[in-house]
Image (cartoon, coloured by chain):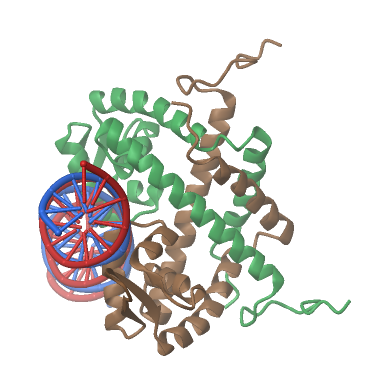
Chain colours: A brown, B green, C blue, D red
Amino acid sequence: MDDANFSRPETGEETSDLSKARLRAWLQILRVSRQTEGELREKMRVEYDSTLPRFDVMAALYRAKDGLRMSALSKSLMVSNGNVTGIVERLVNEGMVTRVAVENDRRALIVKLTDEGRADFARRALVHEGWVSDLFAGMNAEDASDLIAILRRVQSRKGQTHD
Amino acid sequence: MDDANFSRPETGEETSDLSKARLRAWLQILRVSRQTEGELREKMRVEYDSTLPRFDVMAALYRAKDGLRMSALSKSLMVSNGNVTGIVERLVNEGMVTRVAVENDRRALIVKLTDEGRADFARRALVHEGWVSDLFAGMNAEDASDLIAILRRVQSRKGQTHD
DNA sequence: TATAAATATTTTATGTTTAAAACAGTTTTG
DNA sequence: CAAAACTGTTTTAAACATAAAATATTTATA
């Protein structure tokens, strides 16, 4: 009953045990995320002479068979608009994607995988899945679904701050 | 019993249900990580006219009272050596850290928080914890410890690949 | 329909970020 | 002790990343 944080509303101005636990969780997410991204980046570089951002763009375009607008692409990848411009530019130079004008809206462009890009991605995606599975060898099926459930709950609260 | 993946060893050449579950888990980690980093970066920029990488460096130095070598710093943050050079450079210009020569090894430098840097960080860290706690409002104490446990198991396997 | 507001994208300026090369200094070894 | 190997850091080149300004176009409004 003498818990220092008992029945005290969270104000964000003081640190409760819960807020410390969340911070620890966040730092652990960050650690795993950085480590994993680093190893995947290295593999992408060595095996395919490519990069993770380019792979991510291709993944988004692979899912969207009819292609995506630049803005839809940047939104789906959660990166800035200007950023996508450069990545797509490189993929165009590599022959992986094309930019097509949009009918009735001369501002917009639709980005699509080329046939080569589609075939390349299909192959790489399988290998990529294997890399992730290897890196996550310590995670069983239950862990995976637990973790996904927890992170979904975190996400669903995003955008709701109390200040 | 007709489970397609029953009793088949993982080879990394084919995709099992488990490997797909791990991939989904990884993508979810990446999503939450990007979203959270984006919101923290924005707050760091608006509230402190600073950046997350600078905050991370200061956090590492705050923990290490006697300071850290450049190499120890980059290792602890899991970023490249050259990267830390630039971030520390800016923190020096802002008066947050100092670089001190190492006795008996003229190659090395120890980076330390200044008194101002230490005081600044102490204040910011509390606010930062509040931001994280707000962003992770959908996570309770049990979720936090479950998630940390799962991610620790993932980490402990890192570096062991089967190829 | 002129003008204003909104939208889609690129450009610019700045700041990470990495890998690899360069540099400086230290340690090992023949 | 000189050469080679190694270690710690910075520099460089290229890519990624953001925010904000600029550009072009479309839509809404007076």
Measured as percent of width and height from the top left, residue A85 is found at: 27, 67
Residue B105 appears in the rendering = no
Is residue C11 left or right of B15 when viewed as pictured? left
**Quarter of the rendering containing residue D16:** bottom left
Q: Looking at the image, which is closer to me, D29 or B74?
A: D29
Measured as percent of width and height from the top left, residue B97 is found at: 23, 34
Q: Residue at x 82, y 76 (%)?
A: B3
Measured as percent of width and height from the top left, residue A93 is found at: 27, 82
Give the position of the C terminus of chain A as an image quadrant.
Answer: top left
Q: Looking at the image, which is closer to me, A153 or B123?
A: A153
Give the position of the N terminus of chain A as an image quadrant.
Answer: top right
Q: Looking at the image, which is closer to me, B37 or A103?
A: A103
Is residue A32 left or right of B108 when viewed as pictured? right
Is residue A96 left or right of A7 when viewed as pictured? left
* Residue that lies at the very extreme toward the top in this rendered image: A2
Q: Residue at x 60, y 17 (%)?
A: A5
Total count of labels = 0
**Quarter of the rendering containing residue B136:** top right
Measured as percent of width and height from the top left, residue A62 is found at: 48, 76
* Residue that lies at the very extreme toward the right in this rendered image: B1
Q: Residue at x 55, y 46 (%)?
A: A155
Residue B49 appears in the rendering = yes
- Height in image: C9 above or below A34? below
